[in-house]
Amino acid sequence: MPLDATVGGSAATSYVSLSAAEVYLGDRLFASAWDNADETERARALIQATGWLDQLAWEGIRTNTAQRLAWPRQWAPMLEPGLGLIATTRALADDRVQYWPGDAVPRPILEATCELALALLGESSDPAGRDAGEGITREKVGPLETEYASPTLRKQGLARYPAVWTRIQPLLRHAQGGTVTRA
């Protein structure tokens, strides 16, 4: 499947073009996985990252029913992580909320796509698969002993990628994939 980053396009496969990802990741530290990948691998990583992000429940509604991807969206509020609302404009839905433009993909989505593509390129195995060491909090070699964290304390989904999660969390309908702690 070829990379198509047409905003709102009916055949779009990525939120970010290769050239835009090059600009974002080009001067970034710890981006050797991106630097060492060829153009085909980079495109595949951007497409897969977009696919993962596209499965989430986002605020707002799709701008156009013919668009293939979830973004751009109408009525997706601009929220600052941990701070709540950041501006006051637009009178239609709520005059105290500023919304992301419905004709563009927001910067946090573009950045999250690049960050996730980089993380996917840096994985040595399928990150969607089960990690053999998942949840291990303690391991003793002799005589063998392994202690696992409670499943409710393990980060799930995209929350395993902090560079992605911190960017997208304010745009989600609810905080999916976060850590749940029960008392």
Image (tube, rainbow, N blue to C red):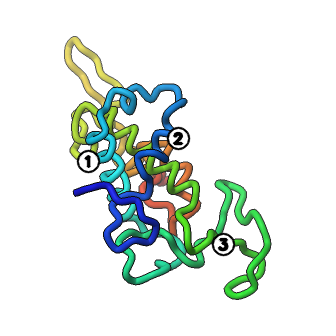
The residue identified by callout 1 is: 128
Relative image position of residue 133 (x, y in whole percent): 27, 32
Residue 19 image position (x, y, % from top left):
45, 45
Say which label, 2 or 3, has the lower sequence index: 2
Q: Would you name the residue on which mark 3 appears?
A: 99
Rendering coords of residue 46 (x, y %): 36, 49
Q: Where the N terminus falls, by quadrant?
A: bottom left
Tell me if residue 175 comes above or below residue 77 in the rendering.
above
> Cα distance, mark 2 to mark 3?
24 Å
Residue shown at the point (38%, 63%) measured from the top left: 54
From the image, state whether disc 2 or disc 1 is nearer to you: 2
Q: Mark 2 to mark 1: distance in Å?
A: 25 Å
Which numbered disc flags the more N-terminal residue, 1 or 3?
3
Q: Amino acid at mark 1?
A: Ala
Q: Which three-letter amino acid code belongs to the residue tagged 3?
A: Tyr
Residue occupying the point 42% across, 52% down: 17
Is 20 above or below relative to 12? above
Amino acid at pointer 2: Tyr
